[in-house]
Image: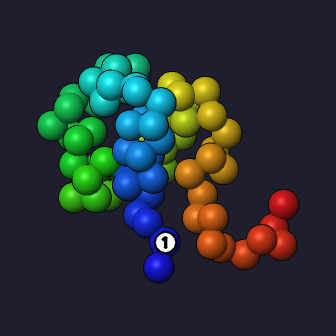
Amino acid sequence: MSEPLGTRIKAYLDEKGIKYSFVADRIGLPMNIFSPILHNKRELKATEYFAICRALKVPLEKFADQKGDKSEK
């Protein structure tokens, strides 16, 4: 089973040394909402996902399920 989306985003932020508060500020979410997203305690809305990708300057596919169907490109 693949990792939840919040876990993948959190791992990316940790790997790159990006502070969670920096991203939360850039997307306009308070930390008490953003942190539960990263810990999979709150569902991530599509608009929030788009904003996170925009703030990090990564393509929407960046955090896609890597174990999913590889035939879609």
Residue 59 at x, y = what percent?
Answer: 67, 39
Give the image's coloring scheme.
rainbow
Q: Position of residue 51 (x, y in %)?
A: 49, 33
Relative height, residue 44 to residue 56 (above, below): below
Give amino acid for label 1: Ser
Going by the image, does 29 lie left or right of 49? Answer: left
Residue 10 pos. (x, y %): 37, 44
**From this viewpoint, is residue 28 visible?**
no
At a point 38% along the width and 53% down the height, the residue shown is 6
Residue in the picture at 61% in, 27% down: 57
> Which of 58 and 50 lies nearest the eye of the viewer?
58
The outermost residue toward the bottom is 1
Image quadrant holding the C terminus, namely bottom right
Asked if residue 55 shows in the view, the reply is: yes
Q: Quadrant of residue 41?
A: bottom left
Would residue 64 be found to the left or right of residue 45 on screen? right
Furthest residue toward left: 32
The location of residue 69, given as percent across then percent down, is 72, 75
Q: Is residue 49 above or below residue 41?
A: above
Name which quarter of the figure residue 24 lies in. top left
Q: 26 left or right of 50?
A: left
- Helix, strand or loop under label 1: loop
Residue identified by numbered label 1: 2
Instruction: Categorize mark 1 by other alpha carbons within 10 Å: few (<14), some (14-19), many (20+).
Output: few
Residue 37 position (above or below residue 50): below
Residue at 22% across, 49% down? 36
The residue nearer to you, when weighing 3 against 54, is 3
